Amino acid sequence: MTPDPERMRDHWWWRPGWHPGRRMYTWHFTFGNQADLHALVDAYQARLAGLPGMDLIPRQWLHLTTQGVGFTDEVPDADLEAVIDAARERLAVVRCVTVSMGPAIIDPEVIRLEVHPADALTPVRRAIRDAIAAARGPEHLTESDGWTPHVSVAYSNSDGPMEPYIKTLDPPLAPVSVEIADVQLIVLGRDEHLYEWQTRADIPLA
């Protein structure tokens, strides 16, 4: 049966390979010092706070998912260091970029901020994918080349109608500009209805 696109569904089902306690190496953009982005997320979350069924994302865990490397128990330390070195070399010639984030939109599992222009961060992701392929082999690029960059505001934790969430996002709030000056390799977990991590490497852009 095809899921109803007009209904919310629980985001926290266990994706293939994931289980409690397992961790993944993955590349994300993170936003610890982005005051304008934090203010926009805060404003949308204030609207959502009175509604059930949503896990609001704390500021410290705001992120833009970029490119997975692999589960920590499947990536040897030497491979990981080779990926970091290859990424550092390639990203040294990729320039910083400023993007627009917002307004918030909704899909069945998440409320998220759109990123414009959508392809502005593609050179960063392409450099990371090239680094993984060079360091580990192209067979380890387990994600597709297609990509929809976004920053999540809240995750659905239950099944139910979408309409209440659509209403609370209207009218849309003005987008904000965010400068992307670096990218992080993180050790990611998702045990507690939350994506949380430790940073393994922080690589600046040119």
Image (cartoon, rainbow, N blue to C red):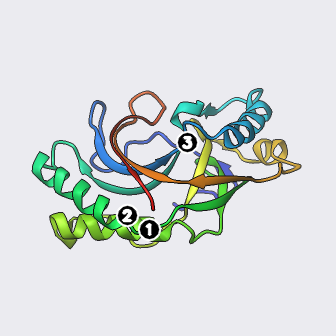
Left/right of residue 14 with respect to residue 39 in the rendered view = left
Which of the two labelled residues, at mark 3 and mark 1, occupies the earlier sequence position? Answer: 3
Q: Are marks 2 and 1 in contact (CB under 8 Å)?
A: yes
187 displayed left or right of 109? left
The residue pinned by badge 1 equals 94
Residue drawn at point x = 43 percent, y = 42 percent: 13
Q: Residues within 10 Å of mark 2 (few under 14, many from 20)?
A: many
Picture coordinates of residue 126 (x, y %)?
39, 71
Q: CA distance from mark 2 to mark 3?
A: 18 Å
Q: Which residue is mark 2?
A: 91
When asked about the image quadrant of residue 53, the answer is top right
Amino acid at dot 3 = Phe
Task: Answer yes or no: is residue 105 visible.
Answer: no
Asked whether 41 or 9 is in front, the reply is: 41
Q: Vertical placement of 112 versus 141: above or below?
A: above
- Report the residue at 55% width, 42% height from top: 31
Left/right placement of residue 187 relative to residue 10 reads left
| Foreground: disc 3 or disc 1 | 1
- Identity, as a three-letter code, of the amino acid under mark 1: Val
Name the residue at 61% across, 54% down. Answer: 179
Q: Which mark is on residue 31?
A: 3
Among the two numbered marks 2 and 3 on one chain, the one whose residue lies closer to the N terminus:
3
Q: Residues within 10 Å of mark 1 (few under 14, many from 20)?
A: some
Give the spatial CA distance, label 2 vs label 1: 5 Å
Residue 166, compared with residue 144, is above or below; it is above
